[in-house]
Amino acid sequence: MNQMNQILIEGRVVRDCHVKATPKGTRVCTVPIATNRSYKDMNGEFQTEVAFFDVEAWGENFSSRIARMATKGRGLRVVGRLKQERWKTPEGKSLSKVFIVAEHIDFQPAKIEENAEDAKNAAELAAKGVMAESQSDSGENEFLDGDGGEAVF
């Protein structure tokens, strides 16, 4: 029976990703992310706990897209599964590492994109506001019916 192994995590890219190919030629992109958890300690003071994870994106198209978009500081949401690798050092010491194998990654807008989008929206709203003012300069109240009576809603 298969047990459930699924993770949903949000964080920020710690540094630009690393792309490599396996011996069989499959591409994999590794993205290191950090995620924060804030909590109140026993003294009532807020503390922040930071955890770091490696996220792997496998496949030609997926790894290429992630490599292009996963820049340092960019926020992302990852849906995937946990995987553990185990190995022994030449001295015989057993080591292991747990990482996330991504199945889906959503990117939060980059700050530059956010600012550009905000500026574009503000310009559009300003243009609409100017149009609305020029259309309502006729002196008529657009919320009153044609007889100057009650407001129409």
Image (cartoon, grey):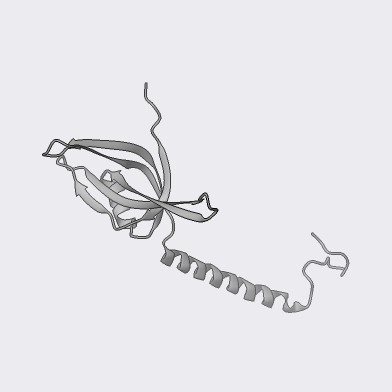
Residue 138 vs residue 106, the one in the foreground: 106
Extreme top residue here? 1
Residue 85 vs residue 130, the one in the foreground: 85
**Does residue 24 appear to the left or right of 32 in the view shown?**
left
**Does residue 98 appear to the left or right of 22 in the view shown?**
right
- Disc count in the image? 0
**Does residue 18 appear to the left or right of 120 in the view shown?**
left
Residue drawn where x is 79% and y is 72% of the image:
141
Residue 1 vs 144, above or below: the answer is: above
Residue 95 vs 117, above or below: the answer is: above
Image quarter in which the N terminus is found: top left
Residue 53 placement (x, y as % from top left) = 33, 47
Residue drawn where x is 34% and y is 43% of the image:
102
Residue 42 placement (x, y as % from top left) = 52, 49
**Does residue 150 appear to the left or right of 97 in the view shown?**
right
Extreme left residue here? 90
Image quarter in which the C terminus is found: bottom right
Residue drawn where x is 21% and y is 42% of the image:
26
Extreme front residue here? 43
Residue drawn where x is 83% and y is 64% of the image:
151
The answer to which quarter of the image holds residue 27 is top left
Residue 33 placement (x, y as % from top left) = 35, 52
